[in-house]
Image (tube, rainbow, N blue to C red):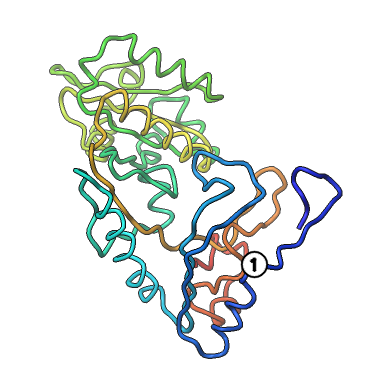
Amino acid sequence: MPSRNHPGKFYALPQAPQQFKQLLMASGFDRYFQIAPCFRDEDARADRSPGEFYQLDFEMAFATQDDVFQAIEPVLAGLFEQFAAERTVSPPPFIRIPFEESLLRYGSDKPDLRNPLRIADATEVFRGGGFGLFGKLVANGAVVRAIPAPGAAGKPRAFFDKLNEWAREEGMGGLGYIIWDAEGPKGPIAKNLEAERIEQLRAATGAAAGDAVFLVCQAKAKAEKFAGFARERLCDLLDLREKNTFRFCWIVDFPMYERNEDTGLIEFSHNPFSMPQGGMEALARAGPADDQGLPV
């Protein structure tokens, strides 16, 4: 393995048990687990394990997805319950969210379910509509994501201006919005969008009098990612996050492949040694570019 801190040099990890574990699985043992200290030559990240940690590692032979979930859910729930103090913990079975739905509703494949905000697809609301900026972008393949902001209609104008400024600092064109007050929908977008389309948007997001909806219009991947950022920022600004709780879920149906936006090439977006749903038949039937096919 190449050394991160010593370019041009390599090192071996003879103690890594991966091949031995896989030999055990292939030879007929039905399951294996270990609890062991691990050391990795990598920088710590906010969403990753540090370089030194203890790992619960398990292998299961001839197992279905449900078998794996049923084996690990009681362990995770039980571990968190033991050290939860006054916090509540999601009981098994954990909810399952398809990958595409997670990107749409939460803007992430690792959503924080303590955040009650749910993103909605508002692309068709703006297609051919009176708000020309979004209409042109949608005609050229962009999508619109709508993030509800309960109770935000009562916020001062500075609240909306600062969010718009933040979006620009993040490299976006801005963050559009519509406010619903006692007199009806307000804001620059509402002035140019037809009443029936505004109602469609309100229905899609569940907005009511006193609420606001923020809007992101970009290419799909960018819109989903930034809508996810906006969802988290709004949750914190409005103090909506559920406290003293752990909320677990499984994200399922990850795509095996994805297209690199910079190079246009097909790349693995998931462990390439995983069997896709549908098995060998799916491998023979669907190609890498087939609608991000072969969920795993």
Left or right of 213 in this view: 257: right
Judging depth in this view, the residue of 144 and 50 nearest the camera is: 50
Q: Secondary structure at mark 1?
A: loop
Q: Answer whether residue 147 is visible to the viewer in this image.
A: yes
Q: Residue at x 38, y 41 (%)?
A: 124
Above or below, 126 relative to 31: above
Horizontal and vertical percent position of residue 213: 30, 28
Locate residue 173, reporting x and y percent: 52, 22
Kind of residue sitting beneath label 1: Ala
Specify the farthest residue to the right: 8
Q: Nearer the viewer, residue 85 or 2?
A: 85
Asked if residue 127 shows in the view, the reply is no
Quadrant in the rendering for residue 176: top left
- Estimate the x, y position of residue 60 in percent, counting from the top left: 46, 78
Residue 277 screen position, x and y as percent: 48, 73
Which residue does the numbered mark 1 point to in the structure image?
16
